[in-house]
Amino acid sequence: MGRSRLYAAIAGTAVVTVVADQVTKMWALRALTPGLPRPLIGDWIQLNLIRNSGAAFSLGNQVTWLLTALALVIVAGVLVGARRVGHRGWALTFGLLLGGALGNLLDRVFREPGLFRGHVVDFLDYFGLFIGNVADIAIVLAAALVALLTAKAVPLRGSPGADGIPAGSDGKPEAPHE
């Protein structure tokens, strides 16, 4: 897959992720009432609207500005790292991570209580353990793909071989050179 197609895959995945995240958050804000959970899949997964000033599990509630700065660093890191992507699996991974980070970053920048201190809209309650959103799902999927691609020894840079996996003389993938 050519470099421009890989960049398009990253951008397309990121855009779809951000749009899905922001549309579902707008829906949740209109359709759900904080403190009144509604079953989605039985009592296992519920719709439960909260505005989260912290990170996962509401950690860091008092340092929203720091979480915003960290999200900006992550987005910048993904954009820099994306220049090295040479495999469509990694392109999908980077797109999901970028889209997820941007989805929550948009909340931090533009939502109440103010610029760079906004609360993230969460509404998917998993077993009463934590509440997240579509951006969080994308970030978790990206982490799972990192684990899978790493376990399969798929190099980030890829190569002209099938799916970017360089083939050795025996037809098996070579070890990454990075």
Image (cartoon, rainbow, N blue to C red):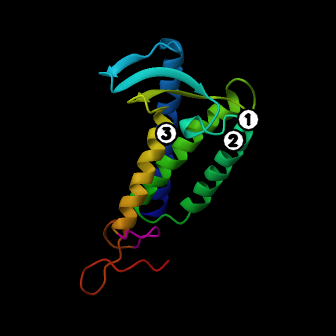
Residue type highlighted by circle 1: Phe
- In the drawing, what numbered circle is on residue 58? none
Q: CA distance from mark 1 to mark 3?
A: 19 Å
Q: Dot 1 surroundings within 10 Å: few (below 14), some, or many (20 or more)?
A: many
Residue type highlighted by circle 3: Asp
- From the top left corner, tell me how far across and down residue 134 is, in percent: 46, 34
Q: Which SS class for mark 2?
A: helix
Question: Do the numbered discs 1 and 2 sit on residues whose CB atoms are within 8 Å?
Answer: yes
20 left or right, relative to 163: right
Pointer 1 residue: 116
Q: Which SS class for mark 3?
A: helix
Going 49% across and 54% down the picture, which residue do you hit? 94
Q: Which SS class for mark 1?
A: loop
Q: Quadrant of the N terminus?
A: bottom left
Residue type highlighted by circle 2: Thr
Pointer 2 residue: 68
Q: CA distance from mark 1 to mark 2?
A: 6 Å
Q: Dot 3 surroundings within 10 Å: few (below 14), some, or many (20 or more)?
A: many
Pointer 3 residue: 136
Q: In the rendered structure, which disc, 1 or 3, sits on the residue that comes first in sequence? A: 1
Judged by its main secondary structure, the magenta piece is loop
Magenta extent = 153-159
Q: Is residue 177 above or below residue 22?
A: below
